[in-house]
Image (cartoon, helix red, strand yellow):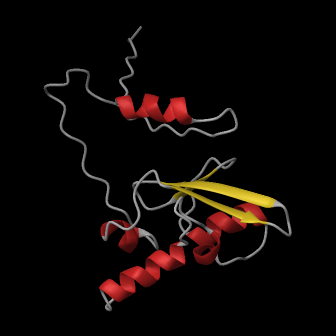
Amino acid sequence: MPTISLHFDPSVFAHLARASGDDTVHLTLSLGGGDESTEAAPAPVVPRGPLADLMQADLLHTGTELTFYQRRANRRGRAVVTPEGKLIVDGHASPFPSPSKAAEAITGNVINGWTLWHLPDGRTLDDLRRELRRADPQH
């Protein structure tokens, strides 16, 4: 029977320590060859899709937690940005390719996720997009 060995970066444990009992924690596992000295370094993940430009401009980062609160509907949402530029929404197994699709998964309505999702500092994704356009008008 093969032995399974799991190695985690210390940041994983730090994230788990900060998580509350209601948080969904996502881990990605990959198969390795066993002997670390002969393993090739994993290829860097390149973000794609609607959030890619924000990530490549260093305005949005992997692991950023996005939230929203709709007072009238008394509805909250939480999502985390993946290295691929997708959003993992609490309660959903698969990541969503765009902010609007991620918001729709929670609200059940077609909705503009760019203006709905907020960063921890209060800015929206649309604010970041405007900031990118000001810095680089070609976007």
**What is the quadrant of residue 18 in the picture?**
top right
Give x and y (percent) for residue 39: 19, 31
Left-right relation of 102 to 1:
right
Position of the C terminus, as image quadrant, is bottom left
Frontmost residue, 35 versus 129: 129
* Residue 139 visible within the image: no
**46 or 119: nearer the eye?**
119
> Residue 119, relative to residue 37: is it above or below?
below
Residue at x 30% of width, y 86% of height: 136
The image shows residue 50, relative to residue 120, as above or below, that is below
Q: Where is residue 100 in the image (x, y as percent from the top left)?
A: 62, 72
Identify the image quadrant of the N terminus.
top left
Q: Which residue corresponds to the image point at 14% horizontal and 28% vertical from the top-left? A: 38
Furthest toward the front, the residue is 121
Q: Is residue 7 visible?
A: yes
- Percent coordinates x, y for residue 108 in the rendering: 79, 67
- Residue at the extreme top of the image, as rendered: 1
Q: In which quarter of the image is residue 66?
A: bottom right
Q: Is 73 positioned to the left or the right of 33 in the image?
A: right
123 displayed left or right of 20: left
**Residue 82: image location, x then y, percent:** 45, 54
Q: Residue furthest bottom?
A: 137
Quarter of the rendering containing residue 110: bottom right
Q: Is residue 18 above or below residue 137?
A: above
Q: Please give the name of the residue rendered at 32% of the width and 91% of the height, measured from the top-left corner.
A: 137
How many numbered tags mark residues here?
Answer: 0
| In the rendered image, the vertical position of residue 29 relative to residue 34, given as above or below | below
Residue at figure coordinates x 19%, y 24% from the top left: 36
